Amino acid sequence: MMIRRALSVAVTAAIVTVPVAWAGTNGHGPGSWHVTGVAAGDGLNVRMGPGTDYPVIDEFAPDARGLELITCVPFYPPRHDKKMSDAQLRALPPPWCLMRDTNMDSIGWVAQRFITADNAAPALPDTLGQSNEADSLMLLSNRFMDGYETLDTLQVLDQIIATLEPVNEQSSPFLPTARIRPMTMAVLALEAAEGVRDRVRYRITYGIEQFPDLASRVPYPVSFIQVDRFSMGSAIRQDALDSYGDEHVGPPEAFDVGPHVSWRLVTRPVQGATSDIIAAGRTELSDAQAQDMRCLKSPCLSTGINIDGAAPWSVEEERPLNGEPVPFQFARAGLLTPAAAIDQLALESNLREMGRFRESPALPDPFLEAVIEIDLAQDSVLDAGMRRGGMKDDSVAAIWRRLIGIPMGENAQTPTVYRAEAYECQRGPKLPPDGGLCP
């Protein structure tokens, strides 16, 4: 990555000209450190430079201790620290650190999130059987990834960045992913790795756990997101075969037939990044597994439009899209992209205060489910619906929101969208007709 290579050049010069004891003026330096958050039987990759685009040259054991920290990037002396605003400091890229063991047998760059100082602040009560916050958070993330292939989070981030605009401008210290929201990040991760497909249905579930920060003692939100993408080509082709016969139906490739996939991401806000990826995992769903899954009450492999019958929606009204600039692709083939659709739905809901602080952090129950359907109707259309529960309201149990996108006209600058809503009530009719209000 160009940003990380530029930082590497700068910090290499600093290491050559500055005594090692002073090299860590941005809060780091030689001392005793240990590896944390790496599963037993695994190892911490040691790389030639600060980023996943550099080759792995060594490995630290998951329980390695007594490591010495030489320096970290982003690198800045104290005088520059005073010139930077809080926003600039928070938005710096995730740090990498140059580490060595006491015997000088191994030396290289590691992601800072996997190392902890031996003299760090004491942990909160050891409710998860781990010695500090990072270990506890990693244990919880590993539980969420059960049954999924664990992925390299920095490689996932690099794949996302490669799809964004602008892509890693050398003149800017800010990563283009810094302001991307958790659910949007998860959809981007899936598409960056799996590619884009037509005739698909996305299902997104989202939960938040407030996690204790050992330094500030102020809880921060950790997001747990699952994104399932169902390839509907096979089901739609089978419907056509049943209706019209083999001689009138094209081959599977004409229906963009592909696998059903599921991704999970754990993210947290850190250093200006809204959704720093802590853990990522991927699995492929069999047809039998997909058949058993529900998307807003209906079977996920149903070839009908599930969202339309999910709630008694209000009258659909054409409303403008939020004009907030985003670094990812906003429209494709005249329609909103899945990432843009979930981003628009999330913008209408304040999710920051969700989740609850518990002294023993646990996997949260999802309070939000969203479904996005693309090209499942006769005409090209994107239909997205979201149910947001956990309202903590004595009247409203859940809010339903819907966004329908139709292809842009010839002279249109943005896709045309229609919106509708519905309310789920704590008392009286569970779902009032025509999007009516709760008593």
Image (spheres, helix red, strand yellow):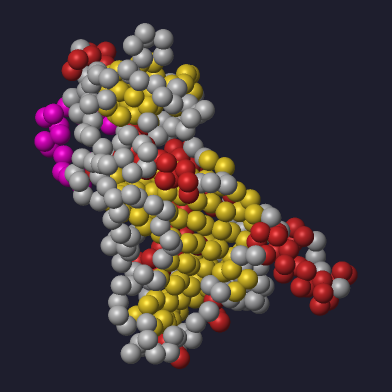
Q: Where is residue 310 in the image (x, y as percent from the top left)?
A: 53, 79
Residue 168's quadrant in the figure? top left
Tell me which residue sits at (48%, 49%) in the image. 144
Does 404 lie within the magenta span?
A: no
Q: In this view, does 341 lie above or below 117?
A: below
* Left or right relative to 234: residue 157: left
Tell me which residue sits at (50%, 71%) in the image. 384
Q: From the image, which quarter does the C terminus lie in?
A: bottom left
Does 79 lie within the magenta span?
A: yes
* Left or right relative to 341: residue 381: right
Q: Where is residue 128 in the image (x, y as percent from the top left)?
A: 37, 42
- Which residues are drawn in magenta? 74-89
Instruction: Name the foreground residue: 279 vs 320.
Output: 279
Tell me which residue sits at (53%, 51%) in the image. 263
Residue 54 is at least partly visible in this image: no
Residue 430's quadrant in the figure? bottom left
Q: From the image, which quarter does the N terminus lie in?
A: top left
Instruction: Name the foreground residue: 302 vs 408.
Output: 302
Q: Is residue 290 above or below residue 392?
A: above
Residue 287 is at least partly visible in this image: yes
Q: Where is residue 375 in the image (x, y as percent from the top left)?
A: 61, 70
